[in-house]
Image (cartoon, coloured by chain):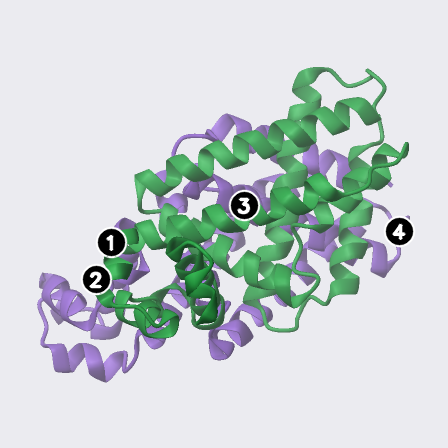
Chain colours: A purple, B green
Amino acid sequence: MAELSTRPTKDVLTDVLLDITAQHGLEAVSVRQVAAAAGVSIGTVQHHFPTKDAMLGAAFTEVVRRIRERVANVVLGPDVQRNLTTVLRELLPLDERRATEVRIQVAFAARAATAPALAAVQADILAEVTESIARVIALAGHGTDGPETSRRKAHIALAAVDGLALHAVSSGSWLDPATLTDALDHLIGMLLVP
Amino acid sequence: MAELSTRPTKDVLTDVLLDITAQHGLEAVSVRQVAAAAGVSIGTVQHHFPTKDAMLGAAFTEVVRRIRERVANVVLGPDVQRNLTTVLRELLPLDERRATEVRIQVAFAARAATAPALAAVQADILAEVTESIARVIALAGHGTDGPETSRRKAHIALAAVDGLALHAVSSGSWLDPATLTDALDHLIGMLLVP
């Protein structure tokens, strides 16, 4: 609780939200529970997050921010294939931190499937990430792929990575980290063949 | 309501569950709402579905049964690539019926990410479907792929298809059916290169 005095309340509440959603699922997230876990009043939580969708949106935005921050800090070398692998690994649940993020993303996507406001946020993020991946794929292909081919490959890459992440977090220990990284390596190998 | 007299009550309740979950999301599904929509008492719903996870499990099982039924009825020809495409299209939200199924699957996966009993169900289904796809890929490769390679490709194929489905239903109209089938065709083309 000491953090409350030095960090903005909304940031503290978002961290609490991430923890509860990751551990117990979206359904367990209530204003009351967030307030209790953060040590603030229910009114304070309601002020920052007037609805459950607002809460989930904040958690998702924070996850995206964290992933972006890690990707920005990746040290890129001259090997484009290796760079793409390194960046896409940040989206797979290869450790508990990333598994938590994937659970939030899946909860957000499930809610976005029936909430147009969240679907618009999801569409923006997916479009941006797809374009970034398409640029890297175009770079790796040394101009052999046209923009349409690069974008198509980027759609497949992001879908496969998010699908692997979805399968991993929703099936207990069915997909282990070695299987995930092996699948990712082969996916990228296939995509970067001109 | 006329159906109630001729069909098992549990089947009618499952249909109602699918409708509510698809239209309003998992969070909207309550014993009270299912009872009202099916025209039965709350006690009747509780008898068939004692918990929310039991309700969601029934909806998911029914979706899997419907997809299996359609896949079993697909007329397969001598072209293995075409057969694989036809079967995997049944998993993409290319019409409203399949979009409803995907929303249920995503809701189930989101819940399975924090509920071990549902994760076990998900793992069994994913393992079974992955093996089926691996067999088709092995067949298409005329023995050039070993079992490990076929299984790895099957993991990638199912992840990409489920990822595309997830992205489509959670992002409004960002991914249209033409983009989805185009991505699927190219994915399969890549996977079936020996």
User: Do discs 4 and 3 belong to a common subunit?
Assistant: no
Real-space Cα separation, disc 4 to disc 3, in angstroms: 42 Å
The circle on residue B178 is: none
- Which residue type carries mark 1? His
The circle on residue B47 is: 1
Which residue sits at x=10%, y=72%? A40
Which residue sits at x=83%, y=37%? B76
Q: Earlier in the sequence, mark 2 or mark 3?
A: 2
User: Which residue position holds label 4?
Assistant: A143
* Residue A109 appears in the rendering: yes
Q: Is residue A78 left or right of residue B78?
A: left
Residue A164 position by quadrant: top right
The circle on residue B64 is: 3
Marks 2 & 1, CB-CB < 8 Å contact = yes
Instruction: Report in which chain the residue with disc 4 lies.
Output: A
The circle on residue B43 is: 2
